Image (cartoon, rainbow, N blue to C red):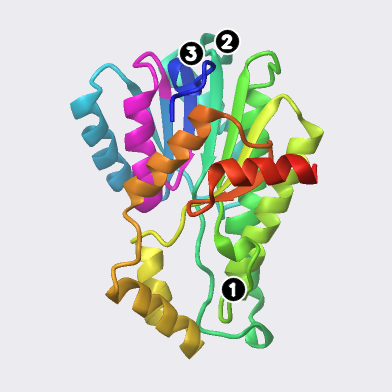
Amino acid sequence: MAAAANDMFSRKACVVITGASRGLGKSVAKIFASKFPSTSLFILLSRNVSNLDVVKSEILENNPNLTIAVKKFDQGNLDQTIYDTLFDSVFKEYNVTADDFEQSVIVHNAGTLGDNTKYASDLSDVQTVQANFDMNVSGMILLNSQFLKKFSNSSKGRSVVHISSLVAIQPVPSFSLYCTGKAARDMFFRVMAVENPSIRVLNYAPGPCETDMQRACREDTLDRTTRDMFQAMHTEGNTLDCDTSINKLVELLQQDQYDSGAHIDFFDDIGGHIAKAKLDS
C-alpha cells in the first residue's frame, strides 16, 4: 500500500533500538536505517558491544552519512545512574540536543525468554524470577521514561514501538515468565497510550521469527506439546525471516492507521484489525 502523507520515515529522527546486536533488533536497525533521512541519529543498545559494532559497520556500508551511536546497555541492571545519564552521554558525545530532531522513535526489542524448563508451579527461585522481571519489565519501563523525559516536546512526533508476541494474549505451557512479561509490557503501553494521546504507541507481535530465542523454544522447552509445536514449525519451514517481519512493521508505521496502543500481529489483516479496533473503542 502507498505510504501515508505523514510518513514518519521522511522526517529527521533520533531512533533508539534496544537489543540491536542480533535477531529482530538487528533487522530493525538495518531496515530503519535505510528508511530514515541520513541526517538522523541512531542509538543502538545491547549488552554485546562487539556485535553492535558489526551492525554499525554493516549499516554504514550502505548509509555512510548516518550517525550511529552504540552503547553497552544491560536492561536488567537497575542502577539509577545508568538510566539517568544514558541519553545525556550520547547527546554530549555527538553534540546534539533533542531540538535537533523533528521526531523521536524508540523500539523496545530487548528481552529474554525466561526459564522455559519449568512449569509455573515450579518457579521457586527468587533470583531467577526477580532477574526476569528486572530485565523484561522494570528496566524497559525505566528506559522508556528516560526516553520520554529527554524528548518531552509533545508538539514533535514521538513514537514508541514495543516488540510484543502472541504469547502476550495467548497462554503457552512452559512459558509462564515470557507470557507474563509480554502481557505486562503490552498493558503498560496501552495505559501510556491512553495517558499520552500525543505519543504513537504500537505493540507489534512479529510472528515466529528464526532467532536464537526461537531455537531455545524448540530445544529447551519443558512441555512436550509446546516443544513439538516449535520443532514442527521449524522443520516445516513455517518460521519467518526477521527482515520479512520488520518490513511488515515498516508498512504499519508508514500507514499510521492503527489505534495507539493496539496489539497487531504479523499475521493480522491490517485493515480488518483497524476496523475492529475502531468499533471496540
Q: Nearer the viewer, residue 263 or 29?
A: 263
Q: Which residue is mark 2?
A: 99
The quadrant holding residue 44 is top left
Q: Nearer the viewer, residue 122 or 247?
A: 247
Real-space CA distance between mark 3 and mark 1, rounded to the nearest whole angstrom: 39 Å
| Residue type, label 2 | Asp
Local secondary structure at mark 1? helix
Does the CB distance between marks 3 and 2 fall below 8 Å?
no
Q: Is residue 52 left or right of residue 71?
A: left
Decide: few, some or many residues near mark 1? Use Cα within 10 Å; few <14, some 14-19, many ≥20.
Answer: few
Q: Which residues are magenta?
A: 17-41
Decide: few, some or many residues near mark 2? Use Cα within 10 Å; few <14, some 14-19, many ≥20.
Answer: few
**Residue 209 seen in the figure:** yes
Image spot of residue 194 (x, y percent): 79, 37
Real-space CA distance between mark 3 and mark 2, rounded to the nearest whole angstrom: 8 Å
Does the CB distance between marks 1 and 2 fall below 8 Å?
no
Q: Which residue is mark 1?
A: 128
Real-space CA distance between mark 1 and mark 2, rounded to the nearest whole angstrom: 41 Å
Q: Earlier in the sequence, mark 1 or mark 2?
A: 2
Q: Which residue is mark 3?
A: 96
Where, quadrant-wise, is the C terminus in this rendering? top right
| Residue type, label 1 | Thr
Q: Is residue 161 left or right of residue 69?
A: right
Looking at the picture, does residue 188 appear above or below residue 56?
A: below
Query: Residue drawn at (62%, 50%), measured in percent from left and top?
Result: 139
| Residue type, label 3 | Val
